[in-house]
Amino acid sequence: MSGTQRSGVAGVSDPAAAGGARVLVVEDDAPLGALLLRMFRAEGYHAELAADGQRGLHLALTRRYDVLVIDRGLPAIDGLDLLRRLRRGGLSTPALILTALGTLADRVTGLDTGADDYLVKPFEAEELAARVRVLARRSARGAHVIPVGAAEFDLITRAVTAPGGDAVTLSGRESDLLRLLARHPSRVFTRDEIMAQVFPDSGTDSLVDTYVHYLRRKLGAQVVHTVRGVGYRAGAL
């Protein structure tokens, strides 16, 4: 970022930041990391810095954040590996990858790994600030609300709200299965993996097929995709 960009950030403010959203920056370039902290704090965020992937993993798993900003080329644990571990652990905090790797394949890989946004260095400070505001607003809606295609799934009410506003309430087991798939939209789960995480006290994997049928009956055939010979992954409404 240029000197002009740096001086232009301090006066930026936004209602989404006024509530003191928490941002974790995982960046090993010390000058850039310090600059990002100043920028986010000027926006009204509570910002913290981790200088390597291992520290970033520890902070993300032990503290609550509303947005993660992660470099790809990190020491200890690569940025994508860090994000992959967080998503596999069930952490759904919105994440933006900030990196010099900007080919189409790089961007697709980052988004498929679990990033919510992807910005290439060098970047405009105003654009980064705007993208983080979007993610902060998403967090402000509540971590209990996760996307299911173009719809939303409320983990508390167990209701799926379609884009048109119609809501469908799921049973406990149905919502547990949908939550598992929706939190890992690019991952294919085997029946054994679903049994272990959703039906640990049941003895037969036929329950998986039964509850997939229930979800499809309530939400449409595309909500769960069958990957032949492997298992199931999240679809879309």
Image (spheres, helix red, strand yellow):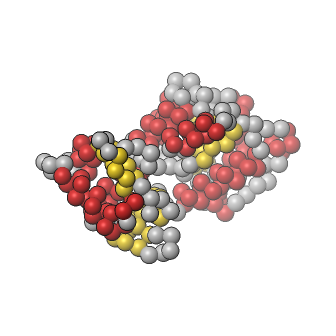
For the residue pair 117 and 25, the one nearer the viewer reads as 117
Which image quarter holds the N terminus? top right
In this rendering, does residue 57 appear at all?
A: yes
> Which residue is found at the position 50% from the left and 49% from the top?
93
Q: Where is residue 72, by image quadrant?
A: top right
Quadrant hosting residue 125: top right
Q: Is residue 158 left or right of residue 29?
A: left
Q: Residue at x 63, y 60 (%)?
A: 16
Q: Residue furthest right?
A: 4
Residue 98 percent across, percent down from the top left: 65, 39
Residue that protrudes farthest toward the left in the picture: 203
Quarter holding residue 99: top right
Q: Is residue 157 visible?
A: no
Residue 26: percent from the left, percent from the top? 59, 35
Is 179 above or below relative to 121? below
Foreground of the two, 206 or 72: 206
When the figure is inspected, residue 127 is found, relative to residue 217, above or below; the finding is: above
- Vertical order, 119 against 221 (above or below): above
Q: Residue furthest front?
A: 228
**Residue 184 spot, x, y in % from top left:** 42, 47
Of residue 67 and residue 83, the one placed in the foreground of this image is: 83
In-image side of 148 versus 49 (left or right)? left
Q: Name the residue rendered at 68%, 33% in the picture.
A: 100
**Against 169, is 81 above or below?**
above
